[in-house]
Amino acid sequence: MSVGDPAFWLAVLQIIWIDLLLSGDNAVVIALACRQLPSNQRAMGIALGTLVAIGLRVVFTGLVTTLMTMPYVKLIGGMLLIWIAIKLLCDEDNGDCEVESSTSLWQAVKIIAIADAVMSLDNVIAIAMAARGSYALLMFGLAVSIPLIMAGAAIVMALLERFPIIVWAGAALLGWIAGEIISKDPLFAGYIDPAAGHTVHMACAAVGAIFVLAVGLLRRRWRRSAPDEA
């Protein structure tokens, strides 16, 4: 496709729309992982987290077809994402969730890297399909992702400071994504009726979100009751 081809600009609009839709989950992960950083490290955390997210998309561009069709990849990735969602649901009032300032930045980047490694697979597939084999359009899609993720993470983090309940909403979102990813693993895909596929995926996504919230609530209750029992 050439720049003068209407299909080129249609693909550009499609990629921008896909980025708007799919960059939100990356932004939520980055904001949740960086929310407990000292204020002077948050901007660096967002920047490094965004670079990790984009870097993983670039790496997966060449591997995505193989990775997405291999059994257990989505299953393991979804389970990792559930673990991250629960881990991020630390009680805001509990000091046990705090980490030393000298290591917190890299711990946040590590959490972002693991989560984005899972979520970037589907994101890359969507952008690659919209690019229709054009390397220039693919790179354009990755470039557009950078400001969207950074701006989204900054907005979510500002909201987290005013409305802590959003932490739970963000963790539920990760659980939702994890449940849907697991249900699409080739290990299970063959047992799902294509006609009911969407319904099954949504049901699994809902189960993932509910599971994360339930474990998070039980974890908070246990932590609050533990000192009294001691």
Image: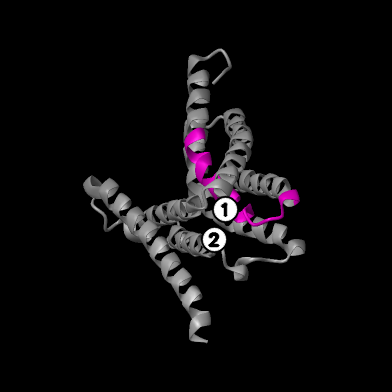
Q: CA distance from mark 1 to mark 2?
A: 7 Å
User: Which amino acid, by three-letter code, is at mark 1?
Assistant: Leu
Labels 1 and 2: the sequence-earlier one:
1
Image check: 23 left or right of 175? Answer: right
User: Which amino acid, by three-letter code, is at mark 2?
Assistant: Leu
Where disc 1 sits, the SS reads helix
Q: In front here: 230 or 141?
A: 230
Q: Are marks 1 and 2 in contact (CB under 8 Å)?
A: yes
In the rendered image, residue 42, in percent from the top left (x then y), is placed at 69, 49
Q: Is residue 60 above or below residue 96?
A: above
Q: Is residue 15 above or below residue 115?
A: above
Q: Residues within 10 Å of mark 2 (few under 14, many from 20)?
A: many
Give the residue at the far bottom of this rendering: 230
Please state the extent of the stretch shown in magenta in the rendering: 20-40
Q: Residue at x 58, y 28 (%)?
A: 137
| Residue indicated by mark 2 | 88
Rendered image quadrant of residue 3: top right
In the rendered image, residue 102, in percent from the top left (x then y), is placed at 77, 62
Report if residue 132 is visible in the image.
Answer: no
Q: Residue at x 47, y 69 (%)?
A: 220
Where disc 2 sits, the SS reads helix
In the rendered image, residue 191, in percent from the top left (x then y), is placed at 27, 58
Give the residue at the far front of this rendering: 228
Q: In front here: 104 or 51?
A: 104
Question: Any mark on residue 32, and which?
Answer: 1
Report if residue 42 is visible in the image.
Answer: yes
